[in-house]
Image (tube, rainbow, N blue to C red):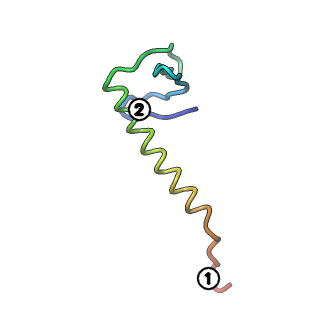
Amino acid sequence: MRLYVETMDAVLVEFDETGRVRFENEDWAVPSLQERRAILFSAQRTHGDLLELVEVLGREPAQPPGA
């Protein structure tokens, strides 16, 4: 997994079921409330972007003009 957390300028690379996270080039840690909010915001935004991409690419291709 790679999730860029813009407000932290960090890349989340792993998480576990206990809520610990690991950022690129860092050790495992329990995120602070502020870090949790930043991670959740980035994850929700990325999720929405990915859903939109799936929807757009899943449609029938548009016919080029003059076809």
The secondary element bearing badge 1 is classed as loop
Image point (31%, 26%), residue name: 34
- Which residue is the extreme one toward the front? 17
The answer to which image quadrant residue 43 occupies is: top left
Image point (52%, 23%), residue name: 17
Q: Where is residue 38 in the image (x, y as percent from the top left)?
A: 36, 32
* Label 2–label 1 contact, CB within 8 A: no
Horizontal arrangement in the rendering, residue 67 relative to residue 8 (left or right): right
User: Dot 2, crowdedness within 10 Å: few (<14), some or many (≥20)?
Assistant: many
Q: Position of residue 32 (x, y in %)?
A: 34, 20
Q: Residue 28 carries which label?
A: none
Front residue of 64/2: it is 2
User: Dot 1, crowdedness within 10 Å: few (<14), some or many (≥20)?
Assistant: few
Three-letter amino acid code at the position of disc 2: Ile
Image point (52%, 53%), residue name: 51
Front residue of 17/46: it is 17
Q: Position of residue 28 (x, y in %)?
A: 50, 14
Three-letter amino acid code at the position of disc 1: Pro
Mark 2 vs mark 1, foreground winner is: 2
> Residue tagged by mark 1?
65
Q: Position of residue 6 (x, y in %)?
A: 40, 35
Count all numbered tags in the image, as a single digit: 2
The answer to which image quadrant residue 44 occupies is: top left
Horizontal arrangement in the rendering, residue 7 relative to residue 50 (left or right): left
- Which residue is the extreme one toward the bottom? 66
The secondary element bearing badge 2 is classed as helix
Q: How far apart are marks 2 and 1 (CA)?
A: 43 Å
**Mark 2 vs 1, N-terminal side:** 2
> Residue tagged by mark 2?
39
Q: Quadrant of the C terminus?
A: bottom right
